[in-house]
Image (cartoon, grey):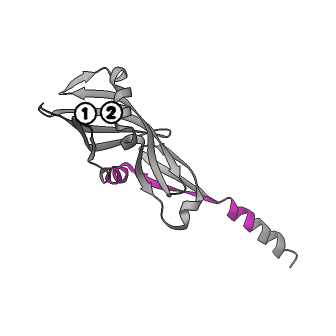
Amino acid sequence: MKRFIPLLSSLLILASCVSYTLTVPQTEVNAKVKKVFPVKKRYSLAEVVLKNPQVNLLNGNRGEVKLSYVLNLAGVKKIKGSLDAIGRFEYDPKSATVYLTGLEVKGIKLGGKEFNARKWSSLIERLLGEKLYRIPVYTIKGSKAKLVKGVEVKNGKLLIKLGM
């Protein structure tokens, strides 16, 4: 009995230190993000449609989203282009979901021509702010959701760290 108590307490201490990682490949992240698109935003004289998202996982805690867009202006033919934005991954314990948040526009193309992203990014971010604010990337099901300790990207994979 004297040996059993120290052994049991050692096992409990070891068990409390156990952690593991959920690995989410880029293909799975892209499949989840594609379910959210296309996204439409209407204004009095215009409509913006965002579609064809492609997420690239960047080392650290960042992700890049490449989107194509269609701008429908009243009385003008459709204007097509693309934009690139970079954000960070965050876990929301209330929804048990990892989101790509805080997207900042880094590049804008209109008909294949580059535009000055600095000049136009704040306008685009204001116009599409709530649409690009939080893009759901992965939802954790069951009791694992309460064990999330952090999220990071390494070697092209989203890593969700779980622990006691």
Within the image, what quadrant is residue 104 found in? top left
Q: Nearer the viewer, residue 123 or 56?
A: 123
Image location of residue 44, percent across then percent down: 24, 37
**Could you tell whether 141 is left or right of 48 in the image?**
right
Q: Nearer the viewer, residue 125 or 115?
A: 125
Q: Residues within 10 Å of mark 1 (few under 14, many from 20)?
A: many
Q: Which residues are magenta?
A: 12-33
> Residue extending furthest bottom?
1
The image shows residue 96, relative to residue 81, as above or below, that is below
Residue placed at 77% from the left, 71% from the top?
Answer: 8
Residue placed at 16% from the left, 34% from the top?
Answer: 74
Image location of residue 41, percent across then percent down: 28, 42
Instruction: Find numbered disc 2 in the image and state the secondary structure of the residue it sits on.
Output: strand
> Residue extending furthest right?
2
Image location of residue 81, percent across then percent down: 21, 32
User: Which label sits on residue 72?
Assistant: none
Q: Is residue 18 magenta?
A: yes
Q: Residues within 10 Å of mark 2 (few under 14, many from 20)?
A: many
Q: Is residue 15 magenta?
A: yes
**Could you tell whether 55 is left or right of 111 in the image?**
right
Answer whether labels 2 and 1 touch (C-beta < 8 Å): yes
Query: Circle 1 sits on which residue?
Result: 82
Query: Circle 2 sits on which residue?
Result: 84
**Could you tell whether 142 is left or right of 107 in the image?**
right
